[in-house]
Image: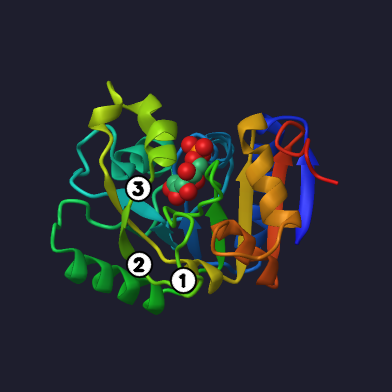
Amino acid sequence: MEVIVVKDKFAGGKKAAEIFKREHDSGAKVFGLATGGTPETTYAELTKSDLDFSDDVSINLDEYVGLGANDEQSYHYYMQKHLFDEKPFKKSYLPDGTDLDAAKETAHYSEIIAQNPIDLQLLGIGENGHIGFNEPGSAFDSKTSKIHLTDSTIKANARYFDKPEDVPQYAYSMGIGEIMNAKHILLEAFGKNKAEAIKAMIEGPMTEDVPASVLQNHPQVTVIVDEEAATLLA
Ligand code: F6R
């Protein structure tokens, strides 16, 4: 695991965009993407860059169950706004939150991931160590599934909704096993609220209680953390 400490999220976004460019220049065609506050500076840098994704595929990690693409809190909407409007891909996949048949939608998404092996997967990390929406206790070999979000995740994401009760309780998420199949994983974490999760991910035991700790077992992981998220590292 390569750990790069940067001053702040803006420097982090620049560094991450450099890695996207390097991978793209060396032939990467399938990009796994994340949402949330963390990748915003990366998407801002990609948007400003001369990178052209019009021949590439993107596959997002997750989507809230029940939210459609026009819903401003949906991850479809987020991706459109932060990246795709400016940098369209040939094909972009996200789980369909409006398909309430979980068995069908998750099997379909797993099929998409299997058919489009991910070259570079961008990840954030939850304060509880989740990656994608794979909450503590998720199996390390899991595939796409419907996840019951924990109170910690609902609380963390309530900032995007009018009130905490509006945060959906369930999400469809790419599984940990599928994330681990990506050739190169790029995880970003900014801010002191991520410091404990980052320490547990890098220095703690590999345990399903800290989903991100599975990355200790992946051959190519780059971690970009700002000084605050790095404060507890040895
Ligand atoms: C988002 C995702 C989540 C977030 C994590 C951190 O697609 O899969 O794992 O990366 O919850 O969220 P932020 O970046 O908002 O702190």
Among numbered discs 3 and 1, the one appearing first in the sequence = 3
Instruction: Report the residue at 58% width, 45% height from top.
Output: 50
Q: Residues within 10 Å of mark 2 (few under 14, many from 20)?
A: many
| Secondary structure beneath label 1 | helix
Residue that mark 1 sits on: 178
Q: How many marks?
A: 3
The amino acid marked with disc number 3 is Leu
Indicate the quadrant where residue 72 lies: top left
* Left or right: 220, with 48 as reference point: right
Q: Which residue is mark 3?
A: 149
Q: Are marks 2 and 3 in contact (CB under 8 Å)?
A: no
Residue contact at pointers 1 and 2, CB within 8 angstroms? yes
**What residue is disc 2 on?**
144
Relative height, residue 111 to residue 48 (above, below): below
Q: Is residue 86 visible?
A: no
Amino acid marked by disc 2: Thr
Q: Foreground mark, 2 or 3?
A: 3
